[in-house]
C-alpha cells in the first residue's frame, strides 16, 4: 500500500513520534493507522522501560483544590528532563492525576506504600468473610487472594480504574505518557486533604 505524506503527518500528530518512525510503522502495518499507533506506543514504552534505571529528578508538583476549598490534593510527578516536564502532555497528565486522586481517595501510589497494619486488618476481614462461606480451608486462601486483589484495585493509585476512562487503569494512562514522551516518568507521592477528615 502507498503510504502518503498525509498519513505520516496524521500519525505524527497523534503520537509525537518522528516522521521516519511514523512512516516505518505505517509501512510495517500496511497503512493501518490503528495498528501503526499501537506499534509506536509499544516501541515508545519499550524504549522508556530501558531507561527505567535513569534519574528522574525533574517534573512538577501540582495542587488541585475542589469543592470551594473543601478538598485539596498535592501530587508530585517526576520525569528525566525539564523539557518533558514543561510539555503540554506532562502538565495535563499531572493535573488529571490530581483530580483522579481527589475523586478516588487512594491510600498509596503502589502496594508497597499501603501501611502494613491496613493490609493485615483487611486480610483478617477477608478471611472472616471467607470462613462464613463454610468452604474448605484450601479454598479460603484463594478467596482471600481474590478479595485482596479487589482491595488493591480500590486503594492503590496505579491499580485504580482511571476516572476519566474506566477502560484503563492509572498505570495504563501513565504507560501511554511514557510511550509518548519516551522518558522515565513516575508518580512519586501525593497528599489528599479533606475538610474535617483525618
Image (cartoon, rainbow, N blue to C red):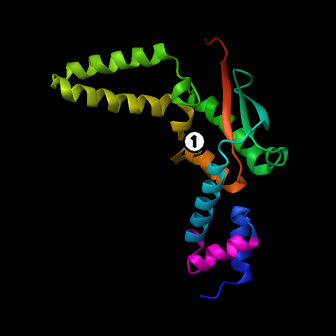
Q: Position of residue 194 (x, y in %)?
A: 65, 18
Q: Is residue 160 visible?
A: no
Residue segment shown in magenta: 19-34
Count the numbered circles shown. 1
Q: Is residue 81 left or right of residue 177?
A: right
Q: Is residue 168 visible?
A: yes
Q: Which residue is mark 1?
A: 170
Which image quadrant is residue 125 in? top left
At x 66%, y 35%, the residue is 187
Q: Position of residue 68 (x, y in %)?
A: 74, 25
At x 56%, y 37%, the residue is 158
At x 73%, y 74%, the residue is 20
| Circle 1 crowding by C-alpha within 10 Å: few under 14, some 14–19, many from 20 | many
The one of 60 and 96 positioned closer to us in this rendering: 60
- Identify whether 44 is placed above or below 64: below
The quadrant of the picture occupied by the N terminus is bottom right
Callout 1 secondary element: helix
Instruction: Name the magenta segment's main secondary structure.
Output: helix
- Identify whether 27 is placed above or below 117: below
Which image quadrant is residue 81 in? top right
Amino acid at each position: 500500500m502507498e503510504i502518503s505524506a498525509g498519513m505520516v503527518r496524521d500519525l505524527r500528530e497523534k503520537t509525537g513520534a518522528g516522521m521516519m518512525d511514523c512512516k516505518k510503522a505505517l509501512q510495517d502495518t500496511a497503512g493501518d493507522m490503528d495498528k501503526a499507533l499501537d506499534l509506536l506506543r509499544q516501541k515508545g514504552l519499550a524504549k522508556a522501560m530501558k531507561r527505567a534505571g535513569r534519574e528522574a529528578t525533574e517534573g512538577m508538583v501540582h495542587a488541585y483544590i475542589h469543592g470551594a476549598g473543601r478538598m485539596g490534593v498535592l501530587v508530585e510527578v517526576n520525569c528525566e528532563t525539564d523539557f518533558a516536564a514543561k510539555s503540554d502532555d506532562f502538565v495535563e497528565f499531572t493535573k488529571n492525576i490530581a483530580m483522579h486522586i481527589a475523586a478516588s481517595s487512594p491510600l498509596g501510589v503502589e502496594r508497597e506504600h499501603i501501611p502494613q497494619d491496613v493490609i493485615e486488618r483487611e486480610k483478617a476481614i477477608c478471611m472472616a468473610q471467607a470462613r462464613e462461606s463454610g468452604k474448605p480451608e484450601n479454598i479460603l486462601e484463594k478467596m482471600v487472594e481474590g478479595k485482596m486483589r479487589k482491595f488493591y484495585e480500590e486503594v492503590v493509585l496505579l491499580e485504580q480504574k482511571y476516572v476519566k476512562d474506566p477502560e484503563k487503569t492509572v498505570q495504563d494512562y501513565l504507560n501511554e505518557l511514557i510511550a509518548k514522551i519516551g522518558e522515565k516518568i513516575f508518580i512519586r507521592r501525593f497528599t489528599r486533604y479533606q475538610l474535617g477528615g483525618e
